[in-house]
């Protein structure tokens, strides 16, 4: 594909993003909605093609287009040595179209089309590099997401009974809407796409895809589709499901934070941080803070995509290695990248006046103001400290530690196709926090907390930075003494084994049992005995009788004579 076509596609998506962003600002300020519907069919069930433009769909769509345009521009240089670059760019465009269909559709059928399109294209992108690891990661990804697809299909079947598939006109007073199972189906579908426990193992495995794919698909857009679906279906969530979602989201945040501390793969650390922030969004939804969760979704998408693009440049620079132990002192070779990555990391930690601070701090303070108990508050602050710990660890191994990698490094900062999208995303992510807060929350929220509780978040961030700096000085030999803990944490609490390998092992072991014991064992013996040996034993005397032998003829003659005599007498 012509390299100029990358820029043309990128500029087209950027212009479309600006138009949709301005439309979203207009709709938000005027509190209006644009709804377009084409009705097809009649009778009990109406099939209709519908498009919904409100501030939520416009803002989310503009963020998706912004990230997509920068990722395509970034891919011009990143994928230039790839022979299948045409297939890559077509898959990325197909992903953007599927995401647009999901965002602007208030119809459950068209939502399913976009939902399935995201899963299929995600699988094609994960297995982009042909290898055994990519194939197994792609299979784990697609099978985990198929559970959510089945839940969406079940919910479609439920709404067939209502007679309309449009989520805006469902009769909420209907007895069908009081179903116990419908909120559960929607929640499971959202949890599979957003990789909540117990469906978390596919997200780090999906890092087998190219880095631009990770920046677009598995960090900012596809994984947030489940959060967006729950926000749209928020009227279905009931208190009992909200409490279950709160527990699972807290466990997801805690698990991903602990595992990221023991992980050395750069892309997997960033993927686990994505998992942690998805848990934070689900936690906000469980507190019925739907608008705040949407705010964090938008701000997180921008700086997380920036984090992945910076990681791609670093991986390029150290000859393709993703192990952070091969990095070190990269700030001297990549000053611009180091500044952008640190800004994204600080935003992830919630450092004041960066994008992540405005959304995360609001979630933390509103959760403290809620009356869910001390356990939830303590776990939330612990997960916040874990985010700071693995972020500081990533910066230490990449920029502050001694040089451990290859002696020669590629000067990727000379390539404008790599640096320009990163700088643009940096500026947008810095400005997104205050600008989105002014747009989504024109009136400040009244949050009344004790003075010490108000400062707890800042104190936790500062204390965690100091703790991680001291921990990074510990040698790896001292850490290796905790082999069991490292193995348990590094394997994501055995979730990949439970969700993928255990099922495979179980079926393989059972089929081996059937093959050895049944098929090649007593089943083969008895079936061969019944089907071959028994008829053979019966047929053999008959064959001997039919032989032309005088003894047999005389014996038969004497038998008949004996029967005649008995009959006469």
Image (cartoon, rainbow, N blue to C red):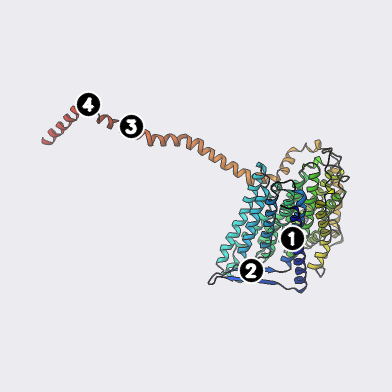
How far apart in space, not on screen, are marks 4 and 1 (Cα)? 96 Å
Residue 217 bears which disc, if any?
A: none
Q: Find residue 507 and report its horizontal and vertical position in percent.
A: 56, 43
Q: Which mark is residue 50?
A: 2
Q: Could you say whether the residue bearing mark 1 is in a helix, strand or loop?
A: helix
Q: Depth-wise, is mark 1 or mark 2 nearer the camera?
A: 1
Can you say whether 403 is above or below 420 in the image? above
Which residue occupies the extreme right position in the image? 332
Of the pair 75 and 256, the residue shown nearer to us: 75
Single out the mark in the foreground, 2 or 3.
Answer: 2
Q: Which residue is mark 1?
A: 65
Other residues around mark 4 within 10 Å, as few (<14) / some (14–19) / many (≥20) = few
Q: Pointer 1 and pointer 3: residues touching (CB < 8 Å)?
A: no
Residue at mark 1 to residue at mark 3: CA–CA distance? 79 Å
First reached walking from the N terminus: tag 4 or tag 2: 2
In the rendered view, does 335 fall on the left or right side of 3? Answer: right
Question: In the shown orientation, is residue 410 left or right of residue 175?
Answer: right
**Distance of label 1 from label 2 (alpha carbons):** 21 Å
Disc 1: CA contacts within 10 A as few (<14), some (14-19) or many (>=20): many
């Amino acid at each position: 594909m012509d390299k100029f076509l990358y820029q043309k596609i990128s500029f087209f998506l950027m212009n479309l993003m600006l138009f949709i962003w301005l439309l979203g600002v207009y709709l938000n300020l005027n509190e209006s909605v644009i709804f377009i519907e084409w009705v097809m069919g009649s009778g009990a069930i109406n099939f209709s093609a519908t498009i919904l433009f409100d501030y939520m769909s416009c803002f989310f769509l503009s963020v998706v287009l912004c990230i997509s345009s920068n990722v395509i521009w970034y891919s011009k240089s990143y994928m230039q040595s790839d022979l299948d670059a045409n297939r890559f760019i077509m898959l990325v465009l197909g992903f953007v179209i599927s995401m647009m269909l999901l965002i602007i559709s208030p119809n459950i059928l068209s939502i399913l089309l976009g939902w399935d399109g995201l899963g299929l294209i995600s699988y094609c992108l994960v297995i982009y590099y042909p290898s055994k690891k990519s194939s197994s990661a792609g299979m784990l990804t697609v099978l985990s997401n198929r559970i959510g697809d089945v839940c969406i299909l079940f919910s479609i079947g439920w709404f067939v009974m209502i007679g309309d598939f449009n989520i805006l006109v469902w009769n909420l007073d209907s007895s069908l809407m009081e179903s116990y199972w419908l909120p559960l189906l929607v929640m499971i579908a959202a949890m599979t796409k957003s990789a909540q426990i117990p469906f978390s193992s596919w997200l780090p495995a999906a890092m087998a895809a190219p880095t631009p794919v990770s920046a677009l698909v598995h960090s900012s857009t596809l994984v947030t589709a489940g959060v967006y679906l729950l926000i749209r279906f928020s009227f279905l969530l009931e208190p009992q499901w909200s409490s279950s979602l709160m527990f699972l989201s807290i466990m997801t945040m805690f698990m991903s934070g602990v595992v990221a501390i023991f992980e050395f793969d750069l892309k997997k650390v960033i993927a686990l941080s994505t998992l942690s922030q998805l848990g934070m969004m689900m936690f906000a939804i469980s507190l019925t803070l739907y608008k705040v969760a949407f705010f964090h979704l938008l701000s997180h998408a921008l700086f997380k995509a920036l984090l992945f693009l910076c990681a791609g440049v670093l991986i390029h620079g150290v000859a393709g290695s993703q192990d952070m132990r091969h990095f070190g002192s990269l700030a001297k070779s990549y000053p611009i990248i180091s500044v952008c990555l640190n800004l994204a990391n600080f935003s992830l930690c919630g450092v004041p006046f960066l994008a992540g601070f405005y959304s995360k701090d609001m979630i933390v303070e509103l959760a403290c103001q809620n009356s869910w108990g001390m356990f939830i508050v303590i776990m939330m602050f612990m997960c916040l400290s874990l985010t700071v710990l693995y972020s500081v660890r990533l910066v230490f191994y990449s920029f502050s530690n001694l040089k451990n990698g290859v002696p020669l490094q590629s000067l990727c900062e000379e390539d404008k196709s790599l640096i320009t999208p990163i700088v643009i995303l940096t500026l947008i992510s810095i400005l997104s926090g205050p600008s989105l807060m002014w747009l989504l929350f024109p009136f400040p929220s009244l949050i009344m907390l004790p003075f010490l509780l108000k400062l707890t978040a800042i104190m936790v961030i500062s204390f965690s930075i100091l703790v991680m700096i001291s921990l990074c000085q510990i040698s790896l030999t001292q850490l290796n003494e905790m082999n069991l803990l490292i193995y348990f944490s590094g394997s994501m609490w055995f979730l990949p084994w439970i969700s993928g390998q255990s099922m495979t092992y179980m079926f393989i072991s059972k089929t081996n049992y059937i093959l050895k014991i049944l098929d090649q064992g007593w089943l083969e013996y008895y079936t061969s005995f019944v089907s071959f040996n028994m008829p053979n034993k019966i047929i053999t005397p008959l064959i001997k009788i039919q032989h032309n032998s005088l003894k047999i003829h005389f014996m038969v003659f004497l038998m008949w004579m004996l029967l005649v005599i008995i009959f006469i007498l």
